[in-house]
Amino acid sequence: MTNDLPTLTEQLRRFRNAYGPSRAKEGRGVGGDVELLALPYLGRGPLAGEWAVRARSFDSLVERWLKRGGKRILDLGAGNGWLCYRVALRGHFPVAADIRIDNVDGLAAGAGYRTHLQLMFPRVAASFEAIPFAADSFDAAIFNASLHYTLDLECALREAIRVVVSGGGIFIMDSPFYRSEETGQRMVEEKLRTASRRFGEMAEDLVGLPFIEFLTPQRLTKASAHLGMKWHRHRVRYPLWYELRPLVARVRRRRPPSRFDIWVTAVP
């Protein structure tokens, strides 16, 4: 990383302080334990559409790779830990990691799972670029709607490789992928242009960090070139309205939308 460390540290602090309130304004965390225990199968409310897509990703992940229990799983960008809760119920041994510890939908919000699990999963404040675990600590690492928040893609992938055993899996789930760099950059420009209207006085704190913001197959290949990673895309069947978004964007002459899906690689 070439960014000035003291400046980044302060920007990260401001980002964490602003992110929780901004998420609360979106309606996250307002349903208390009822909402917490429902995720990702949130059937109603303003966020139901988003979670309908994310539930399909999670179901596909479990059915294809995590159906059998017993795996040590690192949930990177865990938020409130909903994925950890779900896989723990299936007999896995997850750890939630996130830079956010707020009680809106950060790590502190996961306290509500404690009374519903025989063994509560650990929650650890950590960045993707410095994962605080020894080598070979996990059987799988899942970037859970989060890899686009890294400051250094190659560093984050290298850290994931380090903590996962050889032959284990690294998964990218629910991060925005675009077909081209140009389309992704258009998204970033739109985000910056509308930040003040969307976030008000918190805008500078929320968009000031140099996150990578999006992924493309080319970006992923380039960052993995020296790491021995061979990525495979697993196409998820999403709700019809989601699948029709590219067509709608074309008809309305708008920027092509991103797509989620699951990207997976085996650790060399």
Image (tube, rainbow, N blue to C red):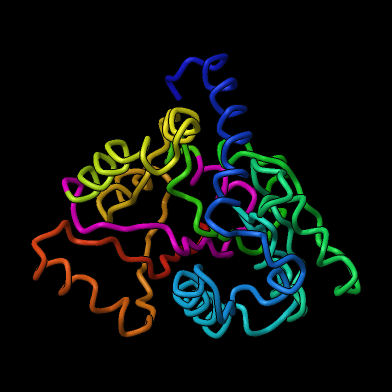
Would you place residue 131 above or below residue 105 in this image?
Answer: above
Question: Is 41 above or below relative to 3?
Answer: below
Q: Residue 26: x and y, percent?
A: 52, 55
> Does the magenta-highlighted stretch encompass residue 177?
yes
Residue 180 drawn at (x, y percent)? 18, 53
The residue closer to the viewer here, 34 or 59, is 34
Residue 165 painted magenta: yes
Residue 240 vs 7, above or below: the answer is below
Give the x, y percent position of residue 225: 34, 46
Give the magenta range. Answer: 156-182
* Direction from residue 232 to residue 173 in the image, left or right: right
Give the left or right position of residue 55, taking residue 229 as reference.
Answer: right
Total residue callouts: 0
In the image, what residue occupies the spot 31% across and 43% down?
191
Residue, x 35% and y 77% (percent of image)? 235
Looking at the figure, which quarter contains the N terminus? top left
> In which quarter of the view is residue 128 placed?
top right
Please give left or right for residue 194 compared with residue 228 in the image. Answer: left
Residue at x-position 81% and y-position 67%: 113
Closest to the observer, 239 or 71: 239
- Residue at 67% over, 61% down: 30
Q: Measured from the top left, where is residue 132 in percent x and y? A: 71, 40
Nearest the camera: 99 or 252? Answer: 252
